[in-house]
């Protein structure tokens, strides 16, 4: 696969100098550098489940709800529906 990258002049010069001194191609040096970068970045990190990723991102647990939140919602919804249709609220 071919990828084109624009490098700042100073990085291009340093890469060229390094490649001449080590007798390696630019592609080889760049591939090795990227592989090292990604292996170091993931070192010690085990694959996490989508749930664990969502928790660490703050999507889960962002709201603190009490244990009765679901049943209270049910009661409020039933009351609103009864009000909307002009019917008496029938207890459970």
Image (cartoon, grey):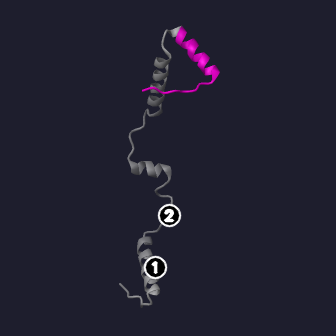
> Please, which residue is most extreme toward the left here?
92
- Residue density around tag 2, few if under 14, some if 14–19, many if 20 or more, within 10 Å: few
Which residue lies under the disc numbered 1? 76
Q: Is residue 77 above or below residue 89?
A: above
Residue at 40% x, 51% y: name it: 51
Gap in Å between the C-alphas at discs 1 and 2? Answer: 19 Å
Question: Is residue 27 rendered magenta in the image?
Answer: no
Question: Is 13 inside the magenta-drawn segment?
Answer: yes
- Image coords of residue 14 (percent x, y): 60, 16
Closer-to-camera residue (85/37):
85
Q: Position of residue 55 (x, y in %)?
A: 45, 52
Tell whether label 2 touches label 1 (CB within 8 Å).
Answer: no
Q: Residue at x 50, y 17 (%)?
A: 26
Hey, which quadrant is residue 68 in on the image?
bottom left
State the extent of the magenta-drawn residues as a range. Answer: 1-20
Q: Main secondary structure of the magenta part?
A: helix
Q: Which residue is mark 2?
A: 64
Residue 78: percent from the left, percent from the top? 42, 81
Q: Residue at x 52, y 27 (%)?
A: 4
Q: Is residue 50 above or below residue 10?
A: below
Q: Earlier in the sequence, mark 1 or mark 2?
A: 2
For the N terminus, which image quadrant?
Answer: top left
Left or right of residue 78: residue 21: right
Element under label 2?
loop
Give the number of marks: 2
**10 Å neighbourhood of mark 1: few (<14), some, or many (≥20)?**
few
Is residue 73 placed above or below 52 in the rendered structure? below
- Left or right, residue 23 beside residue 13: left
Q: Nearer the viewer, residue 14 or 64?
A: 14
In the rendered image, the quadrant that contains the C terminus is bottom left
């Amino acid at each position: 696969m071919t990828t084109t990258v624009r490098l700042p002049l100073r990085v291009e010069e340093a890469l060229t100098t390094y490649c001449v001194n080590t007798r390696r191609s630019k592609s080889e040096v760049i591939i090795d550098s990227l592989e090292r970068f990604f292996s170091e970045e993931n070192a010690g990190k085990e694959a996490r489940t989508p749930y664990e990723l969502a928790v660490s991102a703050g999507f889960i647990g962002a709201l603190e709800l009490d244990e009765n939140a679901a049943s209270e919602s049910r009661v409020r919804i039933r009351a609103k529906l009864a009000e909307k249709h002009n019917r008496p609220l029938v207890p459970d």
